[in-house]
Image: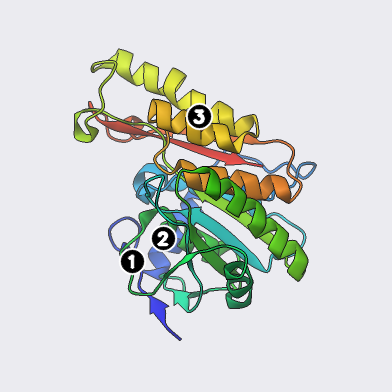
Amino acid sequence: MKIRQAALSGSWYSGTASGCRQEIEYFIKNSTVLPDPSRPAVGGIVPHAGWYYSGSIACDVIRLLSGGESAPDALVIFGTHLYPDAPVAIMKEGAWETPLGDLIIHESFARELCLQVPFDIETQNDAPDNTIEVQLPFIKYFWKDIKILPISAPPSPKSVEMGKIVAEVAQKMGLKILILGSTDLTHYGPNYGYTPKGRGKAALQWVSEINDRSVIAAILSMDPLNIIRDAQQKHNACCAGAAAAALSAGMAMGAVESRLVTYATSHEKSPGESFVGYTGIVF
C-alpha cells in the first residue's frame, strides 16, 4: 500500500504517538465545550494552524462529531489552499501516515465519486497540506479504524456542487459518513500584506468582531455560496471552498442548522501585529 508521509509531524504537532495522545487528552480535559445529544452533528468546520495555536478548537469539533451512536464508514475532509480556477482533487487510494497509525483511504467511495466528478488525482508524493494533515491525528484518536477521503476544494461554485454529490454518492452506496471543512479566517498584519484597518487594538477588534464574524455568519446561515462570495470580498477565509463544500455536503445529509463552537485568534497565544482568526463550527 502506498503511504503519504506525515510531513508536518514534529513541527505543527507532535511527531510521536505518546505526544499526540498527551496533547489531545490535555485539550479534552481543559475543554468547556459540551456535546448536545439532542442535535447530533454530521459535520463541522475546523481551523488548521499548528496545534499550539488552534489544535484545541479542531479537537473540540472532531470530538463532538465522534459522539454518534455508531462509528462512521468514512470521514470526508475538504481542504487545501487553492485559487478559484483550480480543479477539485481527490486522494483516491493508499493511506496517510499519522503518529497514531495510518489512516486508510476509502477507495471504493473514491472510485464511485470519480465517476461523478472530474477530479484531479493526488498521490502519496504530493506536497505537504497542513489544511488536512493537522486534523488526521485527531481523527485517528477518536476513530481507530475509520477510513478517510481527502478532497481539495477550490473557492468556486463547483465545490458547492461537488459537496452535494459527495453526500449523494455516500447515500447511494449505503455509507455513513461525517464531514469536515478546514479553513482559517482573516490573515491580518504586515506578515500577510493585509492591513486595511492599520495596526494595533482597533485592527484586532475589527478582525474579531466584524471581518471574521461576517464569514462565520454565512456558515451559520447555511449559505455555502455566500461563504465563497464573502471570503473573496473580505479576505476572511483562506479555504472558503473547503468550508462551502463541507456545508453543502452536510446540508445534503440533512443538516438544517449550524452551531458556533469556538472562536479565537492567534493573537491570544502570540500577541503581535500579525495574527489569524480561527473558528470551530458543527452542523
Question: Where does label 3 land, which residue?
Answer: 215
- Gap between marks 2 and 3 measured at Cα: 23 Å
Q: Is 47 placed left or right of 221 in the picture?
A: left
**Mark sitting earlier along the chain (2/3):** 2
Q: Residue at x 66, y 36 (%)?
A: 258
**Residue 93: x, y in percent?**
50, 77
The answer to whether 155 is drawn above or below residue 152 in the figure is above
Question: Where does label 1 land, which residue?
Answer: 15
- Observer able to see residue 265: yes
Camera-side residue of 114 and 167: 114
Q: Are marks 2 and 3 in contact (CB under 8 Å)?
A: no
- Gap between marks 3 and 1 measured at Cα: 33 Å
Q: Residue at x 74, y 70 (%)?
A: 173
Quarter of the picture containing the C terminus is top right
Q: Mark 2 or mark 1: which is in front?
A: 2
Q: Residue furthest left?
A: 190
**Label 1 environment density (alpha carbons within 10 Å; few <14, some 14–19, many ≥20):** some
**Label 2 environment density (alpha carbons within 10 Å; few <14, some 14–19, many ≥20):** many
**Mark sitting earlier along the chain (2/1):** 1
